[in-house]
Amino acid sequence: MSLPRRAFLHLGAGLASIAWSGRRVLHAMIQPLAPGARIVRQAAPENLETDFAAIDAFLTPTSQHYVRSHFAVPETASTGWLLAVRGAVGRPLSLSLADLRAMPQVTRAVTMECAGNGRQFLTPAVAGVQWERGAVSTAEWTGVRLSDLLGQAGLRPGATTLVFEGQDRGEVKNQPSPAGVITFHRSLSLDEARLRDVLVAHAINGEPLPAAHGAPARLIVPGCYGMASVKWLTAIEVAVDPAGGYWETTDYAYWDRSSGRPVRRPLLAMQVKSLIARPSPKGQVVRGASVEITGGAWADGVVSRVDVSTDGGQSWHDAELVDPPNPVAWRRWRYQWQVPAGAGEAVLMSRATDARGRTQPMTRNADYGTYVIHHVVPVPVTIA
């Protein structure tokens, strides 16, 4: 489907965020961006945001897919790279890229979102990479099922946890943090990994992984925030005890109050969310015109409905879902809006619901800290 652009000024998501949030991004946006160009949120390490307003297709081109890096891209070469599968296994493995490619291959379309996407919308302002709307993308990932690798290695009795380690490393600047250089690593329970049909991927959109996306191979954990999909994967360790590392207890964690008192838990599943792609915040629409409002919605599960409001949430209308249902990929949507005849301001909103009945909230849960910004975000536009 082709979703046409509207006749309003597009200055790129970075410049729009200046008018929208009024904070911290002037240095990142001096000239207007070409439609589809990624926005540099941080140069070193490289953190690049997709131009969400330019989303016109189900799959995000690799050159436009968002990039999240915690440390500098490690120096890796496919000829010398090996993936270790070790720990509580019967047969430790050391696999080359050729070994991975020789195994049965799987290709899956998966939507990935950074857990901090939308951080610019938080008030008061918070630390961290200042993502606006575009730290989310959908791509086809090709690789080997993790279950096939574990089947080759053979699990020992009592194995419960998988720890995934990347080759990227550095010193953490946030406090509290461990002293010295550490790697980026995350864990999953064995049951969770099986449920999500995790992949060890070596290709994106039919091409070998670029360095910025984790070459030679990375983890893909469908339905989970991007930090779970460890890049530059170098080791899978099978353990009998929970991992409890820095990247899931101190960072990328939240407070769970379900027991009646707060307990620190790792972030994992993406929450139900939708965003408006066009019109952009602070954009202009022509009074009396018929304007197509477009966007995307995703969750850890199937998005079943998107509602749109053009009056700041006073009334809601069904949007048309463009893409077929998919439990691990977004569904683009559209709504035809008859713009009022008089000049003025309008506040647009979108709200998604998934097949389990979970609806995107109007306000956010502060127990997520600077992450999981999935509440309804108002988009003010000028009727000119």
Image (cartoon, rainbow, N blue to C red):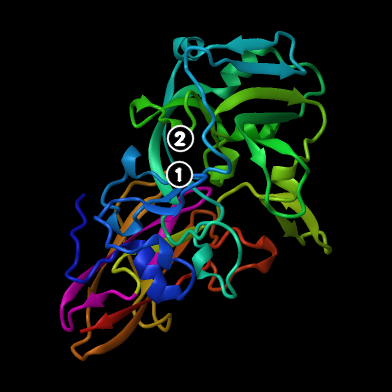
| Side of 296 relative to 366 (left or right) | left
What is the magenta range? 282-307
Q: Position of residue 236 (x, y in %)?
A: 66, 24
Crowdedness near tag 2: few (<14), some (14–19) or many (≥20) residues, C-alpha within 10 Å: many
Q: x, y (%) of residue 94?
A: 62, 11
Nearer-the-camera pick, 15 or 295:
15
Horizontally, residue 241 falls left or right of residue 339, namely right
Question: What is the crowding at mark 1: few (fewer than 14 residues within 10 Å), some, or many (at least 20)?
Answer: many
At which x and y percent is residue 340? 22, 86
Q: CA distance from mark 1 to mark 2?
A: 7 Å
Q: What residue did someone put label 2 on?
A: 213
Q: With respect to residue 305, does 140 lie above or below?
A: above
Number of marks: 2
Are discs 1 and 2 less than 8 Å apart at CB?
A: yes
Which sits earlier in the primary sequence, circle 1 or circle 2? Answer: 1
Q: Which residue is mark 1?
A: 67
